[in-house]
Image (spheres, rainbow, N blue to C red):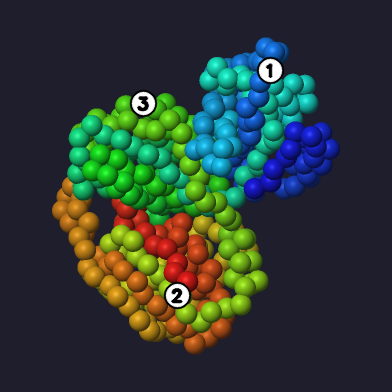
Amino acid sequence: MTIINETDTTNTANLLEKQLETEPKTEPTFAGLSVILRSIQTTTTPIELDRWLALTDFGEDINPIWIPLRKADGVTKIMPVLPDANLYEQLMRSLWRQIASSNLVEWRQKPYEIGGVEVNSDSLHKIAIAINSIQPLPPTLARAIHALCFRWFANTSPELAANLHQQETLPLTTGWEYCSPKKILLKISLLQKELLAPLLWGMNADLGQEITLAGIPCRMHGSIEITQTTSFEKLVQLANQNSLNPAINFKFLTPTSFKQAKKVQTFPLPDLVFGGLLRRWNKFAPSSLNFPKIEWDAIVSAYELKTYAMKMEGGAEIGAEGVIRYKFADSEQARIATILAHFATFAGVGRKTTMGMGQVTIRNS
């Protein structure tokens, strides 16, 4: 993320303005923007945030909505959100103009000084939202959460939601963590830069409000957390800059399985894991970063796996959970596998990743 401080807004704005005008546009420049707020004491009457950035440039009924991010290290950040990421360049220019004019605002009846703007240009995102219920939540949440995410996209654009439904390989995954019987942490990963804006725009009406999940009344937390962002380019650079380890260690957090010869395979064989990740990478990464088809020369050198059933409304899905180590004889395959392994923490592994299956992390040893 790039941070533009209030003190250097004018100079940085001029440089970025020229860059935005000259760069060819193949995708949105920004995935999102965050405004940093500093709490202050003042005798000056601040301007209400909605009026401070009351825009008319985006259409009659489109003004930015403000979504708070989970406070970290005492820092308050809020995101001005629009339904289309292509509008963020114009929004950024409006922010520059307003900050140069006045950076004293009122938000939720408290005065703040705008301390800067964070610019997010990454393509890969992980988002977390807490959801509380009045009674214990069932284990069969997969379809309900899947439907909830698509409802948020449909709130913004029915055409976008319909287009996503028709895709064989979706550019998102979902998962959830049970914090208690009556609380979950909903986790969403996005694999395309342009999806963050419509997801947040469609989600906004439910933040801090009551929703129904699997027939149970729930309440969503009023803020979100963007837990991790990166880009395809950064993942490639990470593997190129670090010394290569011929071994990759995965931990499968949720049941993981694969389609093999029209049957379900529960053991994560190297070609199933990395072959599937490579196809998914080539679908969503820039074409300049695509990899050729690979005949994987790798072995499973150690594993501690168990099969578990993920309960779904239509029945249980069996998959493997636990830890596994893959070793690669070829250094170039090890490099590509390292890139794909880091990509897997966003994209998931195997089948039904939009239903919570195939969630993974990388282990150091």
The correct choice, above or below, for 234 with respect to 338 in the image is above
Q: From the viewer's perspective, is the residue at label 3 or at label 2 nearer?
A: 2
The residue positioned 78% from the left and 26% from the top of the image is 100
Name the residue that disc number 3 marks.
209
Q: Residues within 10 Å of mark 2 (few under 14, many from 20)?
A: few
- The amino acid type of the residue labelled 1 equals Thr
Name the residue that disc number 1 marks.
42
Name the residue that disc number 2 marks.
365
First in sequence: mark 3 vs mark 1:
1
The residue positioned 46% from the left and 38% from the top of the image is 224
Inspect this view and state whether residue 57 appears.
no
First in sequence: mark 3 vs mark 2:
3
- Quarter of the image for the C terminus: give it: bottom left
Q: Residues within 10 Å of mark 3 (few under 14, many from 20)?
A: few
Q: Residues within 10 Å of mark 1 (few under 14, many from 20)?
A: few
Q: CA distance from mark 3 to mark 2?
A: 42 Å
Rendering coords of residue 89 (x, y %): 68, 36
| The label number, if any, that marks residue 105 in the structure image | none
The residue positioned 59% from the left and 50% from the top of the image is 122
Inspect this view and state whether residue 342 appears.
yes
Count of numbered marks:
3
Disc 1 secondary structure class: loop
Badges 1 and 2: C-beta atoms under 8 Å apart? Answer: no
